[in-house]
Image (spheres, grey):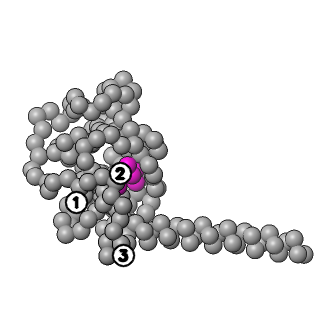
Amino acid sequence: MARSSSGIVAGLTAAALAAVGFLAYQASASAPESLGKPKQDAPATAPRTPRTNADPKAVPAASGKGLRVVYALEADRVWLVGAGGKAKRTFEVTPSTVDPTPGEYSVTTRSGKVTGSDGVPIEHVVRFANVDGVSVGFSAAVDGSTPKPDPAKQTGGIRESRADGQAMWEFATVGTKVVVVP
C-alpha cells in the first residue's frame, strides 16, 4: 500500500510543478515594467511610418540565403522562403508596437494556443526575438481579427490571418532562421 501511495504523491507533485511552471511563464509574459528593469536583448527601433513597396511579392535581396522567414518592417510583409531561395508564401501582417532591429534571428519558442499580451486568445505563436523584455513573434488571433495594436502598450505580437498563421506554424519550427529587414 505504501508504494501505491508514494506513486500517487509523486504524480500529483509532478503535475503541480508543471502547473506552477506554466502559470509562472504566463505571469512573466504579462508582468508590468514597474516590477524591474528587464534585460535588453535588442534595442527598439524608431516609430513606424507609412510603408510602400514596389513589388510586394519579391523576396528582399538583402535577406540572406537558404530556408528562412523574412519579415520586412517597412512593408509589414512576411515571406516564407524555401531552401532554394524562392518564396513559398508571402503575406501582409499587422505589426506590433515593438519592432526588433533588422538582423538575423532564429525561432526560439512556439505555442499552440495562449492569450496574447493584449488579452486576445491567439494560436500558432512563433517567437524569435526579445526587445526590452517584450517577446516578439508571429501569431494569429483565434477569432481571425488583425486590429492595429494600441500604441500606448508595448506588445510584440505580429498578427497574421489564421491561414497565414497555420502556414507559418508548419514552416517555422524552433531554430528556423528569421531575417528582419528594414
* x and y, in percent, of residue 107 in the image: 41, 45
- Please give the name of the residue rendered at 30% of the width and 52% of the height, measured from the top-left corner: 42
Which residue is the site of mark 1?
97
Q: Tell me the magenta residue range.
A: 125-130
Q: The residue under label 3 is which amino acid type?
A: Leu
Which circle marks residue 107 in the picture?
none
Q: Secondary structure at mark 2?
A: strand
> Looking at the figure, which quarter contains the N terminus?
bottom right
In the rendered structure, the answer to whether residue 65 lies left or right of residue 175 reads: left
> Looking at the figure, which quarter contains the C terminus?
top left
* x and y, in percent, of residue 133 in the image: 34, 62
* For residue 93, above or below residue 28: above
Which residue is the site of mark 3?
35
**Was residue 126 drawn as part of the magenta stretch in this picture?**
yes
- Please give the name of the residue rendered at 28% of the width and 41% of the height, measured from the top-left corner: 103
Q: The residue under label 1 is which amino acid type?
A: Thr
* x and y, in percent, of residue 136 in the image: 33, 55
**Was residue 148 drawn as part of the magenta stretch in this picture?**
no
Which residue is the site of mark 2?
129
| Magenta stretch: dominant secondary structure | strand
